[in-house]
Amino acid sequence: MPSFDALSAREISAGIAAGSFTATEVTRAALEAIDAREPQIQAFLEVTPELALERARRIDEARAKGAALPPLAGVPLAIKDNMNLTGTHTTCASRMLESYESPYTATCVARMLAAGCIPVGKANMDEFAFGSSTDTSAFHPTNNPWDTERVPGGSSGGSAAAVAAGEVPLALGSDTGGSIRQPAALCGVVGMKPTYGAVSRYGVVAFGSSLDQVGPFGRSVEDVALAMDALVAGGHDPFDSTSQDVAPRFAEQAGTDIAGKRVGIIPAFMEAEGLTSEVRAAVESAASELAAAGAELVDVDLPHLAAAIAAYYVIGPAEAFSNLARFDGIRYGYQEPDCATLAAQSALSRAHGFGAEAKRRQMLGAYLLSSGVYDKYYYAAQKARTLITEDYRRAFEQVDVILMPASPRTAFKHGEISDPTQMYLADLFTISINIAGNGGITVPLGLGAESGLPVAAQLVAPAFKDERLIAFGSALEQAYAGKVGVWGEVAAMHGAGAPVAPVYAGKGGEL
């Protein structure tokens, strides 16, 4: 029997349907892998064996009765801890919500469960999704499986690390300014942020309501495509007015021909300050591989991208301040004891319930929305947003997708970046996509020549043309799958797609 972590999501569901193993056996293997690897990785805030084994039992019973199984039947799933799931806590990695129990299940989670996934636990994150390292979690940091002295990225670092360490084949994350695509790049996995509105946000604790979007992590583009089909199944969610009807046609795009298609390259991005030479070389190599597959490379200009970070750090904190105002120790959240007045109750509960980065962003948001400041900064940021969105629209009149870096560098060490503004620059190549609302996918390209750590490229598509990301992403994946030495000896355990980090491959969780 194969090691659990050598199987893709498709292989797991197909194996269960064929009777090669049961959903219970797969779930126990996943829980054993988590138990063996978590002391070093710390990807989870809560592991849910009872929920997982009960759902696995139902799948096995359905198969025994001859019932048709859903497409992801028996596939273990990690869920970022800002998504509600009945029977679990939803803490957002904050002391403010440390004891909060999910009263219902988020639509995105419910759709993954309806597709047959097994919920094995809630993944660590930066507190309330504020960060690019997962070090701002109030409970513990998460370590990068390729080097545990380094961060996995953020804010969905727990989800990315769980996939990279072989603890689960699929995970859900949320992306407000790069929080899926940047940790996917640092952990060497595939991560996709769909177009804003493609996936329901109902039941996901909000950071920036006009920026947030849920998406999947996996070790292959095909697995991510299968997860996307599950997330959009059912169409518009009546509980989320921003959600749209999106056809579940992602998996059918994997492996399709990209010959004759046009790929946009942004020359200014390839010369951006802070972009390391090994990441630049990896993206240039990806462009060459797409050209070899028959695509045409076209230079495009996005003249207002320089304003993206400034606009984001006005809009994001302003929306965060509004969204987090409810956590005051009276309506929601940690409650400071022995307070004589409601004012003291609110002030002290927020002071002691939130961490430093959560306070920083809310204070910035409060300032930006204050009288006399609002017009100067918030209106200007919204104007910049319109210009950036128009830049992308014009660019996509010339090309089918755009290729760019996902992160300016490989994974950095815990504590290496202490200046918050320097940390914010980790999202240099991802923020503009959230500003415009387009979809993007990170595809791993092997290991950097200098660092020996994962490097990646990002593909961006027009709004609601996210299926193109699967076609181009799988073309890149296939181009790198057969390259000797790209991933090391452990790559032989896998077909197309990223391997489990070598230290953890095959250790714990055998079927």
Image: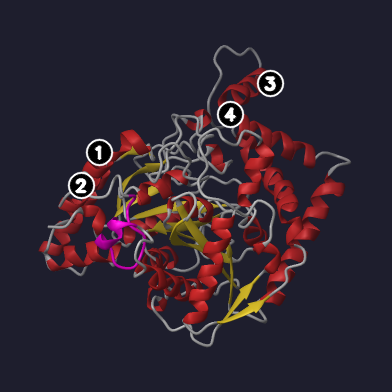
Q: Residues within 10 Å of mark 3 (few under 14, many from 20)?
A: few
Disc assigned to residue 340: none
Q: Residue 237 in the image: x percent, y percent?
A: 49, 62
Identify the residue position indicated by label 4 in the image.
354
Q: Which sits earlier in the primary sequence, circle 3 or circle 2?
A: 3
Identify the residue position indicated by label 2 in the image.
509
**Image marks 2 and 4: residues in contact by CB distance under 8 Å:** no
Between 315 and 298, which is closer to the camera in this rendering?
298
Q: Residue at x 41, y 81 (%)?
A: 256
Q: Which sits earlier in the primary sequence, circle 2 or circle 4?
A: 4
Q: Residue 505 in the image: x percent, y percent?
A: 27, 49
Q: CA distance from mark 3 to mark 2?
A: 51 Å
Q: Residue at x 15, y 52 (%)?
A: 511
Label 2 element class = loop
Q: Amino acid at mark 1?
A: Ala
Magenta range: 488-501
**Image marks 2 and 1: residues in contact by CB distance under 8 Å:** yes
Identify the residue position indicated by label 3 in the image.
343
Can you say which quadrant of the picture contains the N terminus? bottom left
Q: Which sits earlier in the primary sequence, circle 4 or circle 1?
A: 1
Disc assigned to residue 36: 1
